[in-house]
Image: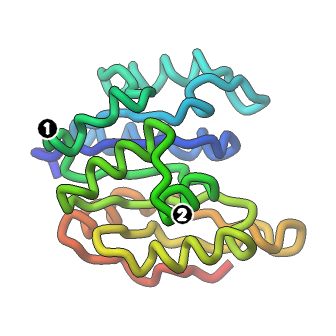
Amino acid sequence: MTDKTVGYAICGSFCTFSKTIPQIKKLVDSGVRVLPIMSQNAYSTDTRFAKAEEFISEVERITGEKIINTISGAEPIGPKKMCDLIIVAPCTGNTLAKLANGVTDTAVTMALKSHLRIKRPVLLCIATNDGLGASAQNIGRLINTKNIYFVPFSQDDPHNKPNSLVSDFELIYPCAEKALKNIQYQPVIKGS
């Protein structure tokens, strides 16, 4: 993957931000050019997990790239063929719903729409508290959509949050390699 450019989109599952940073670093360390993209909520919200400004600084330092955080900044991704692959990690239930239903109102959803229209692969690394609830239909729709691939996921806390699903962030790199070859990493559903 050393000759590839990967868009790395980050949505507002703030509790998984600490899981995504090592994966960005792994891609960069392996020679991949990483183009960071963030939804407006992820880009501007301070939480108990991270201050937005500190997180932005860390991502930009690791990648050496400015974060794309506007719809107008994300629109050229497809026409200019800026990315070989876009990874969304974390991918929230909100972003799953927007992608499954053609809603383009954030930098991330615009990047995905723009990228998919030139038939390039997207890899979703889900983190949603309603994966086995309201988001289940969107996962089902997207898992059956051409050029969309999933990082394997499982229930992260079946007793306390029975509908919650989180992908295994450690599998992002091997899943990215497969997605670039139009192959879904298997099994897509892991045991808890």
Quarter of image, res 33: top left
Residue under pointer 2: 168
Q: How crowded is the residue under tag 1: few (<14 C-alpha within 10 Å), some, or many (20+)?
A: few
Instruction: Say if 6 sits above or below 160 in the image.
Output: above
**Residue 173 in picture, x, y percent from top left:** 34, 57
Q: Which mark is residue 127?
A: none
Q: Quadrant of the C terminus?
A: bottom right
Question: What residue lies at 43% left-to-right and 42% top-to-bottom?
Answer: 9
Left or right: 35, with 191 as reference point: left
61 sits left or right of 54 in the view: left
Q: Amino acid at mark 1?
A: Lys
* The quarter of the displayed image where residue 63 is located: top left
Q: Which mark is residue 80?
A: 1
- Image quadrant in which you'd find residue 97: bottom right
Q: Amino acid at mark 2?
A: Asp
The residue at the point 45 percent across, 84 percent down is 187
Image coords of residue 183 (percent x, y): 26, 76
